[in-house]
Image: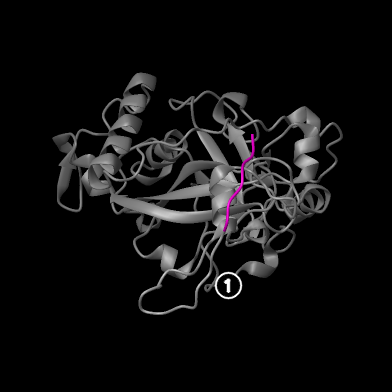
Amino acid sequence: RQVGGEVHLWACSSSNPHQVWNLTDFWAQAGAAPASFVSPAPAVEFYVYRAMRAGETDRYPFGDMNAGNMDGVMWYLMNEVVTEYTARMACPRKFQVHEIRRFRVRMRPTQEMVSQGHHFGARFAYDRGQCVGRCFPGNKCTCKQDCDAQFERSGHVVGCNNFRDHYPFPDTDTQAPDGVWFSFPLGGKCDYPTGSHSCTYSAEETGVISLAELENVAPGKDQCCDGLCTDFWVNLFDVEKTRWRVQQALDVFQRKYPDSPRELDTVPCDFRREAWYSDDDFARLDPWDKTEGCMKERFQDDVQPMYAP
């Protein structure tokens, strides 16, 4: 059968106000790449979250940073923000974190990634806006040389790590076994990802909830901060209770933003350590060592503070 079509264009006027067709956006949403796209892989979409100080996205836009799925962010909150490393309640919150922001990521892997059967590369840590490589327990990181080697080989690709893999961190079982952390190099950010080395993902903010909104789900009397007492964080080390916390957070987003999908089709984190680092000869240094660390030149007050997701 024949399939055909016509496009008629008229001059713009008050009677013809809509004359802009964003076909690139259509291709990216549909997941079908035109011939001009570098990578044959379809575009994929997923949500990521960040626990942040209010107003930080205005000062530090998305890129050269880490994020997580909701399980990964919840573990970060439990481990470092609402408690002092799972000890007593922390008030004020670490880094003055008071909210969780949601971002809709659209990603297209590079040709090199496709040929290896991967969507994601290694999850690098970002500290003060600098890639410091893979970071392991003891605050030892493989530094910028590791990042540069990957970006040169495969492009500025999005990285990830599954908590279940215990690599590179966290390296033990946690109460959030379904957690995933991601890394987003600024060098890969663009409006419509094509899969080129410098255009692998886009990110759009799609909502924010406060920790107060989250904690109001379970009012309490013992765990108090900023005039609010809650039982939301009770049974901190319990896996099923943590899964409950994750679902409650997703529910709060859904109630606040009913026109947005509660969840997007999750793209599995498919990073495989053995495929990337069969030979791993990168030195592991303390990035905070001001004389020999891998970010010693970045100790200024006007650079982005480190957040895990």
Q: Which residues are magenta?
A: 1-6
For the point 17% across and 41% down, the residue is 216
Q: Is residue 198 above or below residue 146?
A: below
- Number of disc labels: 1
Residue matched to label 1 = 300
Q: Is residue 302 magenta?
A: no
x, y percent for residue 215: 22, 41
x, y percent for residue 15: 36, 75
Query: Left of 184 or right of it: where is 296?
Result: right
- Judged from this view, the residue extending furthest toward the front is 1
Q: Is residue 90 above or below residue 19?
A: above
Residue 138 in sight from this viewpoint: no
Q: Is residue 307 above or below residue 176?
A: below
Where's the N terminus, which quadrant?
top right
- Look at the numbered disc 1 and give the secondary structure of its residue: loop
Q: Is residue 290 above or below residue 68?
A: below
Task: Name the amino acid type tagged 1.
Answer: Gln
Query: Left of 202 or right of it: where is 41?
Result: right
x, y percent for residue 278: 84, 31
For the point 55% across and 69% down, the residue is 303
For the point 32% across and 23% down, the residue is 241
Our reading of the magenta stretch's main secondary structure is loop
x, y percent for residue 133: 70, 49
Residue 23 in sight from this viewpoint: yes
Of residues 253 and 100, which is closer to you in this image? 253
